[in-house]
Image (cartoon, helix red, strand yellow):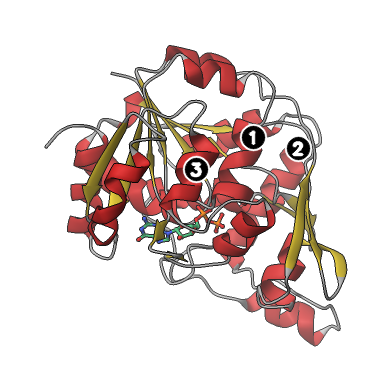
Amino acid sequence: MMITILSGGTGTPKLIQGIKEIYPQEEINVIVNTVENEYFSGGYIAADIDTVMYTFADMIDERYWYGIKGDTFHIREKLIELGTEELLTIGDQDRAIEIQKAILLEDHTLSEVVEFQKNHLNIKAKIIPMSDEDSDIKINTKEYGEIEFHEFLIKYGGEPEVLEVIYSDVNPSPELIETIEKSDKVIIGPSNPITSIRPITSIKGVEEALKGKEVIAVSPFVGNDAFSGPAGKFMTAFGYETSSKGVAELYKAFLNTLVIDNQDAQMKGDLEEIVPEVIVTNTFMNSIEDKINLAKVVLNME
Ligand code: GDP
């Protein structure tokens, strides 16, 4: 049974750690958000794609869900010593992956580059960028006007009030729609609904393709809080409640099943007015057992 997972770079990779323990990688496709991609410091950063690759290759630095565990920072230190401002903290091995992307992108598409790198890392799952085109995400904030997403997160610590999230309209990568169409099940991981998932689902043809499929999503919220990060602010800016109810509303056009946390069990009835099926379980993914248990629920393998 072929499954497709829609992913950002923190919540869904945690679920992927569970899925890959119990499901053959050859039958897994992951469609990954690319709006945060950018050229930086001589390399091409595809943060969410790299996190998904490193997760499959058991190399991810789980402290940050970014970069390679045990990496060194010699190039960063030297660059700073030489007077370069390095807003992002990039390790040496991670940088090599990014530099190679920049080199290969000179005459290959992003899909081809990712296929090349993931094969090199011996990853059997298929990793598909949502688009091969340059995309961009900007946050319009009350305090600083329109700023880059990285600035919002790192320079300003996710603090500014979000008025609007603006990302480019891009065409799907060549395999995106066909991959969804060929899947027996689509899993929307617990990623940021506005900055990670919506950029994928709003690409032309994706929503139509999802409508014909069995689609299950895991909520990234418990009560009125995200498990981590600024997802709540973005939901508010888009006029959605910061909760699993907001997620249900946002995905309702194509969602069959929403998985919510035990702590939100009282919401089940209300949510079933919005989506056909609601599953209540533990959605905190702290240990590998948590991740495997949630993967079993999502894959209906309990
Ligand atoms: P980004 O690309 O780094 O922004 O990461 P994602 O969009 O993939 O993931 C961010 C989301 O993951 C946040 O909204 C969190 O609420 C969610 N998240 C993080 N850890 C967990 C967890 O253990 N369980 C669930 N259900 N969601 C989580």
Q: Is mark 3 within 8 Å of ligand 1?
A: yes
- Residue 111 left/right relative to 273: right
Residue that numbered label 2 is attached to: 105
Q: Using the image as rendered, state which of residue 148 and residue 281 is in the foreground.
A: 281
Q: Which residue is depicted at the point 68% across and 47% down?
A: 100
Q: Determine which quarter of the picture holds residue 47.
A: bottom right
Badge 3 crowding class, 10 Å Cα cut-off, few under 14, some 14 to 19, many 20 or more, is many
Q: Which residue is mark 1?
A: 113
CA distance separating discs 1 and 3:
18 Å
Q: Nearer the viewer, residue 278 or 229?
A: 278
Could you tell me which secondary element the residue under label 1 belongs to?
helix
The reply to whether the residue tagged 1 has its Cβ within 8 angstroms of ligand 1 is no
Q: Residue at x 28, y 18 (%)?
A: 1
Earlier in the chain: of badge 1 and badge 2, it is 2
Give amino acid for label 3.
Ser
Question: In the image, residue 13 lies at what x, y percent?
Answer: 42, 50
Q: Which residue is mark 3?
A: 7
Q: Give the quadrant of residue 159.
A: bottom right
Q: Which amino acid lies under the numbered mark 1 shown in the image of this protein?
A: Val
At mark 2, the secondary structure is loop
Q: Is residue 283 visible?
A: no
